[in-house]
């Protein structure tokens, strides 16, 4: 689960989800964010009319996107945007997502590294169900620290 970005800061809705989920943090991973423009095979840049992606990814790529007169469609996830482009076989819709998403959904990476800030990292939490954490440790109880953020 993405929890913090070096440009955007804390991803507060995910803190709330984590608190309600009953999941436990078992690790963390920092990943450099590289955004790419993905299309179905054979689609040309001039054919694109819409670009779909997560709002944060769209913001991260505004310098590139402002060069074109495309309709920007916010979605819940970058990978799901890529999946949507693949499933609908559109010649007029692109997605902003990772190189891995292009590989997973057999999409062409028509414009690589379109993000504005080249030194952008996101911290992801590795989560597990509480019951699985207990089983693995052989413990009947686990302890966890929960820091709640109060905004005034």
Image (cartoon, rainbow, N blue to C red):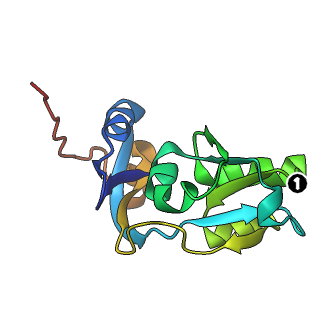
Q: Which residue is drawn at 28% across and 62% down?
A: 6
- Left or right of residue 22: residue 141: left
Q: Is residue 103 visible?
A: no
Q: Nearer the viewer, residue 18 or 98?
A: 98
Quarter of the image that includes the C terminus:
top left
Question: Helix, strand or loop at disc 1?
Answer: loop
The residue lying at 73 percent from left, 71 percent from top is: 110
Report the side of 123 relative to 42 (left or right): left
Answer with left or right where residue 90 lies relative to residue 108. Answer: right
Say above or below: 16 vs 105.
above
- In this view of the protein, which residue sits in the foreground, 102 or 18? 102
Vertical position of residue 71 compared to residue 45: above or below: above
- In the image, residue 34 sits, relative to residue 47, either above or below, namely below
Residue 101 placed where, x, y %?
A: 68, 64
Direction top: furthest residue:
152
Crowd class of label 1 (few under 14; some 14 to 19; many from 20; radius 10 Å) = some
The image quarter containing residue 39 is bottom right
- Say which residue appears at 35% left-offset and 59% top-offset: 26
Which residue is rendered at x = 78% and y = 54% of the image?
A: 48
Q: Residue furthest left?
A: 152
| Of the pair 54 and 133, the residue shown nearer to us | 54
Estimate the x, y position of residue 106 in percent, counting from the top left. Answer: 82, 68
Please state the total of marks drawn on the protein image: 1
> In front here: 118 or 18?
118
Q: Mark 1 points at which residue?
A: 91
| Residue 114 appears in view | yes
Q: Residue 120 placed where, x, y %?
A: 36, 68
């Amino acid at each position: 689960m993405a929890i913090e970005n070096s440009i955007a800061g804390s991803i507060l809705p995910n803190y709330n989800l984590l608190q309600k989920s009953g999941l436990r943090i078992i690790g963390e991973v920092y990943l450099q964010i590289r955004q790419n423009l993905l299309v179905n095979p054979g689609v040309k840049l001039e054919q694109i009319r819409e670009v779909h992606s997560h709002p944060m990814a769209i913001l991260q790529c505004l310098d590139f996107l402002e060069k074109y007169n495309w309709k920007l469609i916010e979605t819940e996830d970058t990978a799901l945007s890529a999946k949507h482009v693949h499933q609908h076989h559109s010649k007029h819709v692109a997605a902003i997502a990772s190189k891995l998403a292009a590989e997973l959904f057999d999409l062409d990476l028509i414009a690589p590294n379109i993000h504005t800030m080249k030194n952008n990292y996101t911290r992801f939490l590795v989560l597990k169900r509480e019951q699985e954490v207990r089983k693995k440790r052989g413990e009947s109880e686990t302890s966890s620290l929960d820091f709640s953020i109060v905004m005034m």
